[in-house]
Amino acid sequence: MASIVIENLTKTFGTFTAIKQMNATFADGQVTCLLGPSGCGKTTLMRMIVGLEKPTSGRILFDDRDMANLPPRKRNVGMVFQYPVMYQTLSVEENLALPLEQDKSLSSAERARRIDEVLDVLDMRDKRKLFIGDLDAGSRQKVAVGRAVARRSDIVLFDEPTTNVEVHAKLLLIRAFKLVTQRLRQTIVYVTHDQTEAMTLADNVALMKDGKILQYDTPSALYETPATEFAGWFLGNPGMNFPPAELSGATVKTPLSSLPLTASATGLPKGDYRIGVRPEHVDVLVAPRPGSVPAVVRDMNVTIAGRFIVTLDVGGATVKAKTNGRPPVAVGAPAHIGIDPAHVSLYRDGVRVADVTGHAA
Amino acid sequence: MSETLRARLYHVVLWIVSLIFFSPVAWIILSSFKTRSDILATPPKLIFTPTLDNYVDLFVNNRGFLLQLGNSIILSVTAVVIAVFVSFLAAFCFSRFKPKGTDFLMFLLLSIRMLPGPAVILPVYLMYVAFGWKDNHLAMILFYAMFSIPFSVWILKGFLDGVSTRFDETGRVNGGSWLHIIFRVVLPQVKPGLIAAFIFNIIFVWNEFLFNFIIGGVSTQNIPYALAVGAYSDGGLNWTFISALTSIYILPPVLFIYFFQKYLLVGMTFGTVRGEV
């Protein structure tokens, strides 16, 4: 078991900088998801951890062992790729056995025991004699997962393993993956651009953008209190609302609330202030309530689980609200919206600077 | 004109063209079973009594023949096996590690092959004499290998570029060494390329006359050498000898090409036409 320590890591390809001065620690025995849009450096970071790319500068350590100049096979890291590559002419169990055979310290009985265990966890006992060519993409990826964990390496990396798997198989794969990680307690880094996957699997999520980790937090903290506007916008569907706000002292004025709000900090410098509020914390009302403001419904769409996404115009700002069940309003008609101050944060120049504690007296 | 008639006409034309191209080969093979007077008879004799005398002459009375046949086989097979092995490793490096100036190096490599043999024969001859390598099997093998490597590197690089680096990467993170990746993971996937490179080069070495004549010698003489040297005797062309030796000489390449013809196509296109094999 080992934690992954990243120190001042930089990687450039020609003039393009994929990773910029990154510092992070991925804790021992935990599942860390690297989440971010395409091209943010997630995969590059993984490839440096496993040893397929050399850092331009900076260090990667497993606990306190520097990994510089160690080839992948000496690092004791397993990896599952986006496209599973397997020996088509070998059966499932032979494919699982191959990496184990590279480790000469294992007895053949131990190898067989590990293969059995992995097949059990993956629920693939009945498929052990099948050839890879006979399996669908999801099962192949399961075998790839099994192959990566069977070696009991300290660290296992997953590079968007579910991208090419169809939806149903994807759910099975994620379930198998959770079981495996719970059983084996390896340090796991999982790259994805799918926020649902990250939220489901991760102990901690590292949100990446432009070669940097913007926020390293638990999934719920990342969702509830995103540290940047980007995080608020990237997570959630739709993302967070960021209507403009004015700050004087600790009092926040915003078009979303007729009553001023109170910020948890005072003496903040000037800047572009906005409040951040999740669509599910914007209530769509027929009748006004204290603090609510009038709005016009511009659009309304149904989404999964009978929820509705309502787009409203409020005093020059556009706000999205998410409601359970059909909201009691019609498109084009006037309505009212109210926000819950407990779920509102204050942002300055794209960065979260304060909580909102309630309505000002 | 109906479609079937047109197709038939094409076939007839194709057959005629093929037969015209094949006729010299047919003539030499038929001649090898004729007597000297039958070969030169006018008009040409199509109906004749076959005789094996020419072959008996070659195998029993001609003492040089078995040495020449053996040399041809040993020189070509050994040189090409060495060349393909070296080329495979070189092509792997070019394809995977992409050293600076790969494109230029690849061009330089091919330009060696574009060079006509007579252009380099003098310096090579002087070098071989100075090293004392003349009439030496190993030296001849090295020379032919050197001449076969550029083209093989080109063919194999095309094939290796077609093998995704995902295979390498998966192998490496699963604990495989480079040797394991090169020979166990990648090599099986470029077998068609290896066979194509092998065939192309073996045909080159099999047909090679100039260098064998100049930097070879008595102990390394091959069949083209024997044909050139033995063609004249008794004040004329020795047609029975030529026809019998030629018939044996063309047999191995013909068999090779017959059994591996599908690889020739991919070889000619540097591995860019895939899915044919």
Image: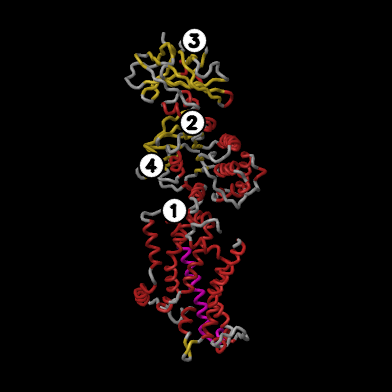
Residue A189 seen anywhere in this rendered image of the structure = no
Mark 4 element type: strand
Amino acid marked by disc 4: Lys
Residue A11's disc number: 4
Mark 2 element type: strand
Distance between mark 1 and mark 4 Cα atoms: 20 Å
Question: Which residue corresponds to the image point at 46% horizontal and 24% vertical from the top-left?
Answer: A240
Return the chain for callout 3: A
Name the residue tied to disc 2: A204
Q: Closer to the observer: label 3 or label 4?
A: 3
Name the residue tied to disc 3: A289
First to last magenta residue range = B57-86
Whether marks 1 and 4 lie on the same chain: no
Distance between mark 2 and mark 3 Cα atoms: 38 Å
Q: Closer to the observer: label 2 or label 1?
A: 1
**Image height check: is B226 above or below B87?**
below
User: Picture quarter containing residue A226?
Assistant: top left
Amino acid marked by disc 1: Arg
Amino acid marked by disc 3: Arg
Whether marks 1 and 3 lie on the same chain: no
Distance between mark 1 and mark 3 Cα atoms: 67 Å
- Furthest-left residue in this view: A270
Q: Quadrant of the C terminus of chain B?
A: bottom right
Whether marks 4 and 2 lie on the same chain: yes
